[in-house]
Image (cartoon, helix red, strand yellow):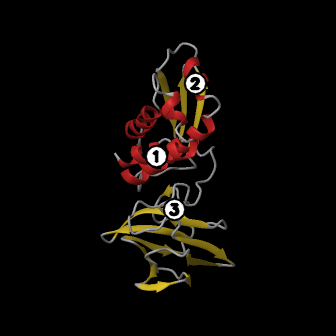
Amino acid sequence: MGILRDFEGRLERIVEGFFSKAFRSGLQPVELAKRLLREMDAHKSVGVKEVWVPNRFVLRLSTDDMETMGGMEKALSKELEQVVVDGARERGYGLVARPEVAFETDETLGRGEFHVEGEITEETGPAAPGEPGEPGGTGPALVLVENGRALREYALSSEPATIGRLAGCEIEIHDPGASRRHAEVRRRGDAFVISDLGSTNGTLVNNATIREHVLADGDRVTIGRTVFEFRRS
């Protein structure tokens, strides 16, 4: 599964092999990621227009496994939160708010054992740019379009949103035709401007290559084979 491969790759880059060595026996981080995805599938809530899934998770680990992490919980939490975003995007699910993954120690658990509790809550705060929301929302957004169908909406705000293959981009896309940091959308007054960041294959708006372009409602942005539509509301 691509989501899990990307997760393990990001961990390796961020902590330089720490987890592969520390978790050589016992609990494996990828097992936590798999469980989060299963929890999302098992506890989805079907709404009128959207299927919503848990966005806040508490992972209860044994004392031994918590000690093994050696203070790396924040790094692991961040990457697991990205798994939630990627999993929701791939499955067409919605998140009501920002994903959050927290760790707690459970002294009743043995090494390698863990429990997961998920819930749908808005208490974690509004979704950041790039996190999946509901198409047809109420604010400016880039909408991922495939075969004429809107798949996912990426809300835009006053903060710049970088588009690219690099883990950590606000809008991360898995497209071989995209550069690691391909383009950026930035608010300028009441307008939103997309700028190419020196990408290898260029950024197109309405099939024309641009260096910078003020987006109008309905503009089509093409990066590699990935197509977005800009919507003002």
- Residue 149 is drawn in which quadrant? bottom left
| Sequence-wise first label, 2 or 3 | 2
User: Is 230 placed left or right of 1 in the picture?
Assistant: right
Image quarter where the C terminus lies is bottom right
Closest to the observer: 230 or 15?
15
Q: Residues within 10 Å of mark 2 (few under 14, many from 20)?
A: some
Reading the image, the residue beneath label 3 is: 171
Reading the image, the residue beneath label 2 is: 68
**Tag nearer the camera, 2 or 3:** 2
Q: Is mark 3 on a helix, strand or loop?
A: strand
Reading the image, the residue beneath label 1 is: 9
Q: Position of residue 211 (x, y in %)?
A: 54, 83
> What's the amino acid at mark 1?
Gly
> What's the amino acid at mark 2?
Thr
Q: What element carries label 2?
A: helix
Q: Position of residue 221 (x, y in %)?
A: 45, 76
Instruction: Identify whether 217 is placed above or below 157.
Output: below
Q: Residue at x 53, y 50 (%)?
A: 96
How far apart are the alpha carbons under marks 2 and 3?
A: 32 Å
Q: Which residue is drawn at 32% across and 72% down?
A: 148
Q: Position of residue 197 (x, y in %)?
A: 56, 74
Q: Position of residue 135 (x, y in %)?
A: 45, 63
Instruction: Identify whether 66 is placed above or below 209.
Output: above
How far apart are the alpha carbons under marks 1 and 3?
A: 18 Å
**Can residue 156 be seen here?**
no
How far apart are the alpha carbons under marks 1 and 2?
A: 20 Å
How many numbered discs? 3
Q: Residues within 10 Å of mark 1 (few under 14, many from 20)?
A: few
